[in-house]
Amino acid sequence: MSLKDEIKSKIKTARYLLEAVVVDFGIWLFYSIGLQNASEVAAKISVFVSKKIAVHKLAYKNLSDAMPNLTELEKEKILHDMWDNLGRVVGEYPHIAKYKPEQVMKFVTISPETFSNLTAMKNSQKGGIVFSGHIGNWELGPKVLLNYGIKVGTVYRPLNNPYVEEMTSSIRETEMITKSPQGNRRIIEIIKNGGYVIILADQKISEGEPVKFFHDMAVTTTSIARIALKYDVPLIPARIIRTAKGFEFKAEVEKPLEIQKSENINDNVLKLTLEINRKLESWIREYPAQWFWVHNRWKR
């Protein structure tokens, strides 16, 4: 390693350590002031900071392109509420991570239909895939399934900062599966053993296929559809919606998507992936302020 590269590496390590100290302090602070206070304080900080950072412009562009019929006033309100929600997700995280599933359910309501679908999942001898998005407080999803005795693994992308990654992943209750060939093998193992894997399907990835999402094509993972088709397992839509300014939610678990097959495997995969995107889009249109508009979803 050259001297220049060594200096860069040390600067990067120092930055990661500084970030870890800030995150560690944030986790301690939000946990120490209590759940509702943490939610409120983090929301206020997030809204205050939002218009001072460049990513707010990306969120505005994404929202404007995806939902062009909105007025300026409507867009302003949606983005304000989006930042409010994202702040709450951050402030609530230390509490959710440490709460047992039954504690979380004190703040989450479910409909009779969702209860029926959860019961069917638990009683089934067959595992499957639960797909969702960065909607409401997505961190609650695994806790809801665990509360109903459902075996769960969660697919995620590890954070770039290894110190923060270790800090945040160590307090999660479910098995975390990285997006990797090894992770894909683990997904299949869990499903074959009757468990369910949660995947947030709204993220941009470097490898995927362009599939329609709102107004334009977006590079979308096809691995969800491929696994569901190859192993003939259910693909279940689920989301967590914030129902009030504060820690109140409803969980919705739907019946599995209807999977139609032809002899063309690639065609089947793309059609099913499009159905996933359509489901996500319908959810986002219903609650636009609860989605992650800051994500560069349509980047080519």
Image (tube, grey):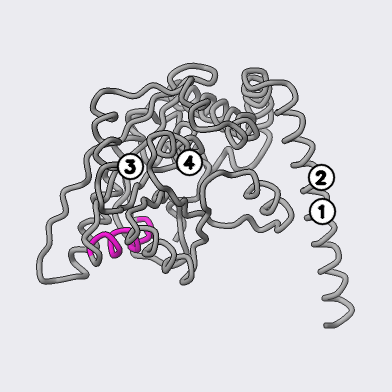
User: Looking at the image, how many numbered discs can be counted on the residues?
Assistant: 4
As drawn, the label of residue 21 is 2
Q: Residue 89, percent across and down?
A: 57, 32
Q: Secondary structure at mark 4?
A: helix
Labels 3 and 2 touching (C-beta < 8 A): no
As drawn, the label of residue 211 is none
Of the residues shown, which amino acid type is indicated by label 4? Lys
Magenta stretch: give its range: 218-229
Q: Residue at x 36, y 52 (%)?
A: 195
The residue wearing badge 1 is 17
Q: Residue at x 60, y 42 (%)?
A: 55
Of the residues shown, which amino acid type is indicated by label 1? Leu
Q: Residue 213, percent across and down?
A: 32, 49
Labels 4 and 1 touching (C-beta < 8 A): no
Q: Mark 4 or 1, which is nearer the eye?
A: 1
Of the residues shown, which amino acid type is indicated by label 2? Val
Q: Mark 2 or 4, which is nearer the eye?
A: 2
